[in-house]
Amino acid sequence: MSATNPCVTCGACCANFRVSFYWAEGNDAPNGYVPAELTEQINSFYRCMRGTNSSTPRCVALQGDIGGVVGCSIYGDRPSPCRDFAISLDGSNPACDRARAKYGMAPLITIQEVA
Ligand code: SF4
Ligand code: SF4
């Protein structure tokens, strides 16, 4: 992420959902890459990022303060849901907007419109 990416001053999606994915994305599987020690088993097929299987989720890999300066400590090895989650620059991902709202941050499309 670049210094101008709004995600580096957000992080809300890393503390809003259960981040679950196929177990074999873990690095204890032959072609896996996500640090397995940072994950929790859900069932025979799925695991999740530790800290996200909670009513107050916060991924164990999230560094910093939400809405301040944040970072993912395993960015290059993050699981598929994190790679697939789209930033809502144009309002196209309501889940991003909802995550930001939970932490008192406006939808990015609104911020861009007034900038
Ligand atoms: S909630 Fe949206 S803006 Fe915030 S870190 Fe996630 S994708 Fe980026
Ligand atoms: S692995 Fe990284 S990008 Fe994915 S939820 Fe955790 S902190 Fe966020």
Image: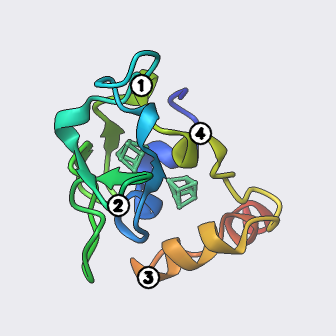
Residue at disc 2, CB closer than 8 Å to ligand 2: no
Q: Residue at x 47, y 38 (%)?
A: 79
Q: Nearer the viewer, mark 2 or mark 1?
A: 2
Report the side of 36 relative to 34 (left or right): left
Q: Secondary structure at mark 3?
A: helix
Q: Which residue is mark 1?
A: 77
Q: From the viewer's perspective, is residue 64 above or below residue 112?
A: above
Q: Mark 1 or 3 closer to N-term?
A: 1
User: Which residue type does callout 1 highlight?
Assistant: Asp
Kind of residue at disc 2: Asn
Task: Give the spatial CA distance, label 4 vs label 2.
Answer: 22 Å
Please tell me how crowded label 4 is: few (under 14), some (14-19), or many (20+) other residues with Cα within 10 Å.
few
Between disc 4 and disc 3, the foreground one is 4
Q: Nearer the viewer, residue 36 or 29?
A: 29
Q: Identify the secondary structure beneath mark 1.
A: helix
Contact (CB < 8 A) between labels 4 and 2? no
Q: Which residue is mark 2?
A: 43
Q: Residues within 10 Å of mark 2 (few under 14, many from 20)?
A: few
The earlier-in-sequence mark between 4 and 2 is: 2
Marker disc for residue 8:
none
Foreground label between 1 and 3: 1
Q: Which residue bears the numbered disc 3?
A: 102
Say if 63 sits above or below 51 in the image: above
- What kind of residue is marked 3? Lys
Q: Are marks 2 and 1 in contact (CB under 8 Å)?
A: no
Left or right of residue 43, residue 111 in this image: right
Q: Residue at x 67, y 53 (%)?
A: 87
